[in-house]
Image: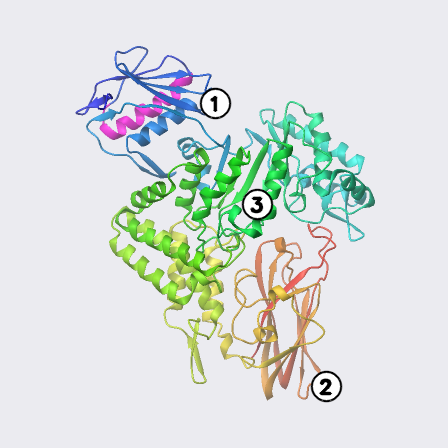
């Protein structure tokens, strides 16, 4: 029997909302507003009423916890000292059928009677610090509804990778190279020299200045830059030997900083070379560890994947040293944000495992920009899991799909299940730096089935659901386009070959144009994590569909390298990749890029006969965050016999050496010569420059099609 009461009956208020403290004012206002949206009635705010929703502070609850207590006089929402009362209201609204799917998409039912059921429950978060790093959660209203925290400067004065900010290389490196890491015998600006006492003094001084500018922030990160070039100086190695490795040196350093600021929490990273727990040193109570799972695969839960055993051991090792651990986990495929990534089945078991090992905070990294594969669903599910890792995941998944996609939800659930089942059956891993190329769960036969499912989903969609289904289909379209690019003139490729004739496959260009139009319509600023706007993506597609690399004299001709060889990770089919008609993609992981590490490149193509040549070109890729730089120049030579060579001209890089982002450049020269052989000689910078995070380390050069016309 329901012993609840009606807050609104037949369109008129039949009870009140009692507000007796300032803390309850905001929560009461939210409840009043949504009840008005549901029913059209304004429930009065009062300091006393016979039947009402009442608010109170309950000091026995977690600061974000809340409770519902029903009686004949109505419902009391008790809240902790933080956001508890407000969080209680949002949970009550969900009991009444309201849903906030995204920051701009909220379902509010129309009800002539708003009945408050009898509720006697206590809700407290299992996770104390909960960040769902999607653009949706940048909206304060979304964060409040879904009980999320943030890393804005009201709480976090500085957030990760802060050594460059605390010890700027532009200010100090030239005059004091000894402040910076010794890597392979050279001082580089990659990381500070932590064993140098002057470095400690400067970092503390600069941190104190930062704190004076933001007095409200409690958390301050003192943490490594985003690279793996830490110091191997004798002084650093001595500290590492004493405290159990690079992580020991880091904790030794950060502990000393924390002693200077006992009223603040000093956070640092356990990331890549500092991920393993140290020996001989324990983090101070006011030191927070941000432990990163970047190396882990996402095809199965951490505890079930032998390749994640080391990470699990590190989780448990850090747990023996401190209870102040925040895990930085990753939910997306960074290299291809708009690409299918079937990792939904690992979200809950991974959170449950980490919480069971004492982790009390999470930074769940999604896409900072609007959109990303299933961004609405991932953000919603992640928020729910961060509050309660043991919730009924299947029910929440189905609830979202049915509510957000309407009649298409069941079909989209079939798509999700088929892709996840296919991944599991394949036995392949799922890498956050992967691509849609050459993976079993995106095989041609499966892609055809996925396409049929989305055709069905679109046919079922009406009204508001039409755009939602079209938006969630975009990753499948992206995968189809990228697979066609990579296949060239092979099966399913962007080109179709009929005897000696090659042309662009019908429909490919139109598919790409439709995809780019959708990117713009739905406000997607970038296709990858760091770069590639919709317009740039279209330029890249037109380069393939209108540039006609398959009509070059060099297409399909034999190529050989001279005194160079590509890195085995980026070797593809060897030299033949330079004349296969497939251009390198928008990232170095897509298309037909060949990667050379710390080498110049010399490649010779045999045209098969002496022919008139009017132009020669070599494509190159730049992605400096991944240590890939354009050649400084490319020189071309020609020969009729492969022995005697003539100069055909050269082209210099048109971009500045310090230009970031993904940049393609085609090094092209006009020619008027009859030759059989063409040689391209690309000059690498060989070593990452002093201003780069990989300073002193070998630099990559990625090249693609050698086109002779």
- Magenta stretch, main secondary structure, is helix
Residue hosting label 3 = 293
Numbered-mark total: 3
Q: Nearer the viewer, residue 203 or 613?
A: 203
Highlighted range, magenta? 23-41
Q: Is residue 315 left or right of residue 237?
A: left
Q: Residue at x 63, y 34 (%)?
A: 320
From the top left corner, tell me how far across and down residue 122 is, in percent: 39, 24
Residue 392 occupies which quadrant of the picture?
top left
**Which is closer to the viewer, label 2 or label 3?**
3
Q: Residue 678: image x %, image y %?
A: 64, 80
Residue 336 spot, x, y in % from top left = 49, 55
Query: Pointer 3 and pointer 1: residues touching (CB < 8 Å)?
Result: no
Between circles 1 and 2, the one closer to the viewer is: 1
Horizontal side of residue 225 vs 106, given as left or right: right
Q: Is residue 158 above or below residue 48?
A: below
- Mark 1 secondary-structure assignment: loop
Give the Cα distance between marks 1 and 2.
80 Å
* Neighbours of disc 1 within 10 Å: few (<14), some (14-19), many (20+): some
- Res. 63 mark: 1
Which disc, if any, is residue 644? 2
**The C terminus sits in image quarter:** bottom right
């Amino acid at each position: 029997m329901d012993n609840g009461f009606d807050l609104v009956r037949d369109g008129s208020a039949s009870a009140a909302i009692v507000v007796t403290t300032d803390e309850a004012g905001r929560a009461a206002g939210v409840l009043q507003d949504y009840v008005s949206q549901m029913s059209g009635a304004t429930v009065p705010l009062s300091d006393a009423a016979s039947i009402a929703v009442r608010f109170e502070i309950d000091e026995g609850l977690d600061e974000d916890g809340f409770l519902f207590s029903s009686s004949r006089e109505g419902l009391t929402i008790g809240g902790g000292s933080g956001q508890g009362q407000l969080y209680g209201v949002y949970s009550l609204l969900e009991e009444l059928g309201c849903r906030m799917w995204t920051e701009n998409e909220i379902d509010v039912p129309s009800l002539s009677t708003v009945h408050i059921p009898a509720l006697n429950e206590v809700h407290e978060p299992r996770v104390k610090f909960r960040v769902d790093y999607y653009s949706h959660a940048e909206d304060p209203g979304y964060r409040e509804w879904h009980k999320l925290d943030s890393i804005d400067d009201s709480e976090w004065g500085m957030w990760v990778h802060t050594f460059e900010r605390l010890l700027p290389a532009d200010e100090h490196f030239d005059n004091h190279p000894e402040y910076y890491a010794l890597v392979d015998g050279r001082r580089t600006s990659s990381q500070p020299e932590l064993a140098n006492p002057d470095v400690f003094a400067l970092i503390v001084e600069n941190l104190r200045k930062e704190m004076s500018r933001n007095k409200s922030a409690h958390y301050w990160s003192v943490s490594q830059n985003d690279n793996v070039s830490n110091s191997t100086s004798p002084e650093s190695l001595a500290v590492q030997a004493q405290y159990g490795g690079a992580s020991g040196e880091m904790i030794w350093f950060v502990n000393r900083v924390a002693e200077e600021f006992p009223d603040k929490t000093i956070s640092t990273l356990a990331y890549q070379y500092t991920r393993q727990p140290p020996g001989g040193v324990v983090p101070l109570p006011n030191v927070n560890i941000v432990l990163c799972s970047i190396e882990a695969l996402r095809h199965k839960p951490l505890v079930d994947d032998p390749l994640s055993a080391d990470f699990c051991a590190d989780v448990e090792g850090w747990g023996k040293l401190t209870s102040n651990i925040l895990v930085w986990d990753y939910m997306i495929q960074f290299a291809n944000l708009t690409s299918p990534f079937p990792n939904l089945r690992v979200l809950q078991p991974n959170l449950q495992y980490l919480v069971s090992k004492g982790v009390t905070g999470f930074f769940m990294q999604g896409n900072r920009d609007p959109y990303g594969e299933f961004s609405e669903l991932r953000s919603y599910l992640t928020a729910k899991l961060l509050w309660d890792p043991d919730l009924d995941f299947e029910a929440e998944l189905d609830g979202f799909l049915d509510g957000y996609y309407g009649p298409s939800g069941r079909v989209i659930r079939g798509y999700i299940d088929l892709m996840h089942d296919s991944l599991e059956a394949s036995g392949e891993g799922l890498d956050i730096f992967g691509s849609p190329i050459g993976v079993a769960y995106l095989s041609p036969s499966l892609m055809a089935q996925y396409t049929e499912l989305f055709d069905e989903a679109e046919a079922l969609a009406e009204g508001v659901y039409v755009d939602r289904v079209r938006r969630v289909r975009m990753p499948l379209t992206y995968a189809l386009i990228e697979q066609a690019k990579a296949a060239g003139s092979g099966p399913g490729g962007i080109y179709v070959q009929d005897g000696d004739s090659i042309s662009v496959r019908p429909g490919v260009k139109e598919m790409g144009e439709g995809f780019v139009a959708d990117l713009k319509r739905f406000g997607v600023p970038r296709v990858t994590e760091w770069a590639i706007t919709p317009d740039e993506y279209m330029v890249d597609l037109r380069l393939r569909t209108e540039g006609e690399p398959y009509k070059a004299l060099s297409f399909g001709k034999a190529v050989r390298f001279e005194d160079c060889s590509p890195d085995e990770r980026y070797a593809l089919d060897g030299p033949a990749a330079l004349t296969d008609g497939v251009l390198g993609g928008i990232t170095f992981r897509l298309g037909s890029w060949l990667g050379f590490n710390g080498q110049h490149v010399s490649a010779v193509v045999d045209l098969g006969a002496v022919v008139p040549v009017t132009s020669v070109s070599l494509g190159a890729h730049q992605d400096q965050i991944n240590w890939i730089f354009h050649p400084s120049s490319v020189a071309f030579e020609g020969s009729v016999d492969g022995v005697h060579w003539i100069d055909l001209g050269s082209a210099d890089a048109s971009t500045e050496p310090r230009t970031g982002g993904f940049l393609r450049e085609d090094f092209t020269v006009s020619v008027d010569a009859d030759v059989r052989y063409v040689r391209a000689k690309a000059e690498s910078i060989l070593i990452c420059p002093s201003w780069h995070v990989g300073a002193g380390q070998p630099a990559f050069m990625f090249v693609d099609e050698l086109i002779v016309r």
